[in-house]
Image (cartoon, helix red, strand yellow):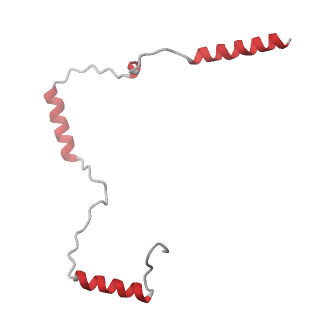
């Protein structure tokens, strides 16, 4: 009884594994899309040029406004050092 149960379980596992193993091309060519068209290359290029002019590839809200500072670098550095010394802003790794 034990041998027949073992044999049947091995046969079931082998049958199940054989269904999962299917040979195919290495480049997955069965998924390649085939196109049949009668348009010329010039027509496609002209359409692509008009679409590119009407669409923006820049994400909405990504424009950065420029700002010209009138502050002196040494003055800002001195103010930052004073703020660290007086404990107004944290310093180091303990944020």
Q: For residue 78, what is the image quadrant? A: bottom left
Q: From the viewer's perspective, tell me whether residue 65 is left or right of residue 85.
A: left
Left or right: residue 10 versus residue 54 is right
The spot of residue 61 in percent (x, y) is: 31, 60
The relative height of residue 47 versus residue 41 in the rendered view (above or below) is below
* Residue 90, quarter of the rendered image: bottom left
Residue 57 in picture, x, y percent from top left: 26, 49
Q: From this viewpoint, which residue is outermost toward the right?
A: 1
Q: Quadrant of residue 25?
A: top left
- Residue 76 versus residue 61: which sits nearer the camera? 76
Looking at the image, the residue that sits furthest to the left is: 42
45 lies above or below 62: above
Horizontal side of residue 52 vs 95, given as left or right: left
Residue 20 in percent (x, y) is at 57, 18
Give the mark count: 0
Q: Residue at x 30, y 59 (%)?
A: 62
The residue that appears at 18% across and 30% down in the rendered structure is 44
Quadrant of image for the N terminus: top right
Please state which of residues 2 and 36 is positioned toward the viewer in this rendering.
Answer: 2
Position of 2 with respect to 60 (left or right) is right
Q: Which residue is found at the position 24% from the left and 83% from the top?
A: 74
């Amino acid at each position: 009884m034990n041998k027949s149960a073992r044999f049947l379980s091995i046969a079931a596992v082998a049958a199940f594994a054989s269904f999962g193993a299917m040979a195919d091309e290495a480049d997955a060519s069965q998924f390649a899309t085939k196109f049949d068209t009668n348009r010329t290359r010039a027509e496609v290029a002209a359409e692509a040029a008009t679409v590119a002019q009407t669409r923006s590839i820049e994400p909405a809200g990504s424009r950065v406004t420029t700002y010209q500072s009138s502050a002196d670098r040494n003055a800002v550095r001195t103010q930052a050092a004073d703020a660290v010394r007086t404990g107004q802003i944290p310093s180091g790794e303990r944020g």
